[in-house]
Image (cartoon, rainbow, N blue to C red):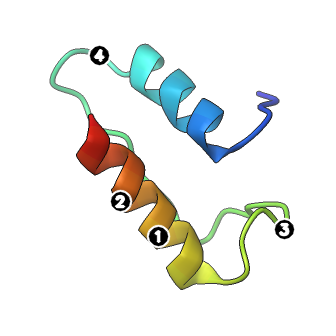
């Protein structure tokens, strides 16, 4: 599913997850050069989730 940025990806995942469900960030999946490294991606994921 195409998305403009990681925040949009997360918003879509949240909307599609059932109430009480989980959104999993898989380190094996490509982030298509959106981030410098895995720690940057994980930090961004954490920031977005904590803002929910």
Q: Which residue is tagged 1? A: 42
Q: Which residue is tagged 4? A: 18
Q: Out of 37 and 22, give the one closest to the viewer.
A: 37
Q: Which residue is tagged 2? A: 46
- The reply, left or right, for residue 8 in relation to residue 36 is left
Q: Out of 11 and 21, give the one closest to the viewer.
A: 11
- Check disc 4 and report its element: helix, strand or loop: loop
- The reply, left or right, for residue 19 in relation to residue 32 is left
N-term-proximal mark, 3 vs 4: 4
N-term-proximal mark, 3 vs 2: 3
Q: Are marks 1 and 2 in contact (CB under 8 Å)?
A: yes
Q: Which residue is tagged 3? A: 33
| Quarter in which the C terminus is drawn | top left
Is the residue marked by circle 4 packed among few (<14), some (14-19), or many (20+) residues within 10 Å? Answer: few
- The reply, left or right, for residue 50 in relation to residue 11 is left
Q: Is residue 18 above or below residue 45?
A: above
Is the residue marked by circle 3 packed among few (<14), some (14-19), or many (20+) residues within 10 Å? Answer: few
What distance separates the C-alpha of mark 1 from that of mark 4? Answer: 22 Å
What distance separates the C-alpha of mark 1 from that of mark 2? Answer: 6 Å
């Amino acid at each position: 599913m195409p998305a403009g940025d990681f925040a949009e990806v997360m918003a879509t995942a949240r909307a599609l997850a059932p109430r009480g469900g989980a959104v999993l960030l898989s380190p094996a999946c490509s982030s298509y050069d959106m981030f410098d490294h895995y720690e940057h991606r994980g930090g961004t994921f954490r920031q977005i989730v904590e803002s929910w």
